[in-house]
Image (spheres, rainbow, N blue to C red):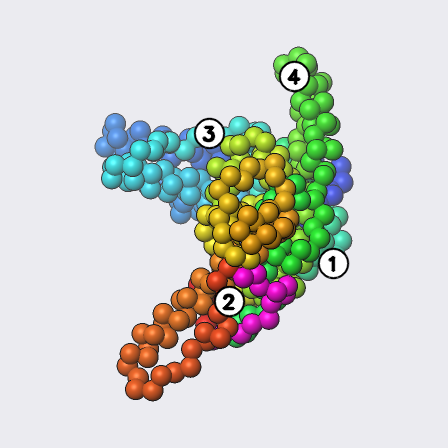
Amino acid sequence: MEYKTTYKFRLYPNKTQINKIDYILDLSYKLYNAMLEQRKIAYELNKDFYEDLKVNYNTQSVELSKLKKEFHEYNEVYSQVLMNVADRLDKAYNNFFRRINEKKKGKKIKAGFPRFKSKKQYRSITYTQSGFKIMDNTHLFLSKIGKIRMFKHRNIKGNIKQLTIKKDRSNNYYATFIVEENNNINYSLFPYNAIGIDVGLISLIKTSNDEPVEPPKYLRRSEKRLKRAHRSLSRKQKKSKNRENARIKLAKINNHISNQRNDFAQKLSKKIVDNHNFIAYEDLNISNMLKNHKLAKSIEDASWGMLINDIIYKAERAGKYYIKVNPRNTSKKCSKCGNIMDDLSLDIREYHCSKCGLTIDRDLNAAINILNDAINKIFNKFIVIKKIKNKHKKRVGTDCAEFMPVEGKPIPDKANFSMEAGSPG
Ligand SMILES: [Zn+2]
């Protein structure tokens, strides 16, 4: 299996390098607009004067060497970076034509003709194959720019296919590598260390074996700073230097928070995938939950969607099982006897079953239910397959029924159980 992975590292260019990157960005956006203009003119001429002017990616990329002779400043840009400008425009056109086709087929979308870009919108350049080299863990060499300090916080596995240098809205610079990774996964035939994960409201994340997960409080801490920055921005006069400074400050805080979230999700997902071979989680429609504002803060804090995505991503690469279960009744059902408690409001933190008397943390109860549902889900599948197979056999084969969890009973912590080979899908 081949995977495409991206690696993003912060760059720390010096003054001269910043000027160079900004200069190249400036030339790139001007080139982009000029090429768009050229295509538009060709279109008008063809339409109004029955000419047959061909302007496309090929003609435009061939013209780049002519451009360099007339406008010497374009010699300051690495050739592939220039080619990529033509490629971006071509992609914009292809998307435009695709949307026109979809519209013809009755899809309700705007076709949206490719637009001229402003200097503020054009924030990245791409080296498609060459012109760059990672020197060591601290430096990146870029042709026409130089050796830039880079914080490479993890090792790249696989073949680097492309590099994009981006200046974000808070004027930080980043290098994003697209890497192709060959990964021959060896699925373990025996899932072990099964875990169910529930997103709670107070503890945020609860696992079926009650692993302690430190809830991240940084958002609320940063929130005050964020509010202050928002207020400060709104007080500044439009188009003033002060307003621009306030905007950058706000963007920096937002950036900081998003980095913290990402960091939390990365670390937690790694821990979960490293320690567990079978991971069960709820199929929650995150966006729906976010509409409820009381929940919104906690969920955002926990970066739940990001966390699940990270888990799936890592589990897939490590050859581990991840099972999505239906969220229906996972918090209402008693994990011991299967009784369903209907009147369970969100502020009740302890689950108390009126039938069997089980008293348990509400989220822990849900996490155990999630794990049980996932195990039932895959074992039912295997038993169905077995039954179909057995129809054609004289002798009755051995079922894996002895591994079936008893209906409604909690699975012991870090359940060890075995099953047949194959992906549970
Ligand atoms: Zn019960």
Read off the magenta span: 409-420
Q: Which residue is mark 2?
A: 405
Q: Label 4's element?
A: helix
Residue 136 at what x, y percent from top left?
Answer: 74, 58
The residue at the point 60 percent across, 53 percent down is 358
Residue 161 visible to an observer of this rendering: no
Disc 1 residue type? Answer: Asp
Whole-Å distance between the Cαs marked 3 and 2?
A: 61 Å
The residue at the point 74 percent across, 57 percent down is 137
Whole-Å distance between the Cαs marked 4 and 2?
A: 59 Å
The nearer-to-camera label among 2 and 1 is 2
Marker disc for residue 116 = 3
Marker disc for residue 234 = 4
Sequence order check, earlier mark of 4 and 2: 4
Sequence order check, earlier mark of 3 and 2: 3
Looking at mark 3, is its residue's CB closer than 8 Å to ligand 1?
Answer: no
Q: Which residue is mark 1?
A: 136
The answer to whether the residues at label 1 and label 3 have Cβ atoms under 8 Å apart is no
Residue 83 at what x, y percent from top left?
Answer: 50, 46
Whole-Å distance between the Cαs marked 1 and 4?
A: 43 Å
Quarter of image, res 25: top right
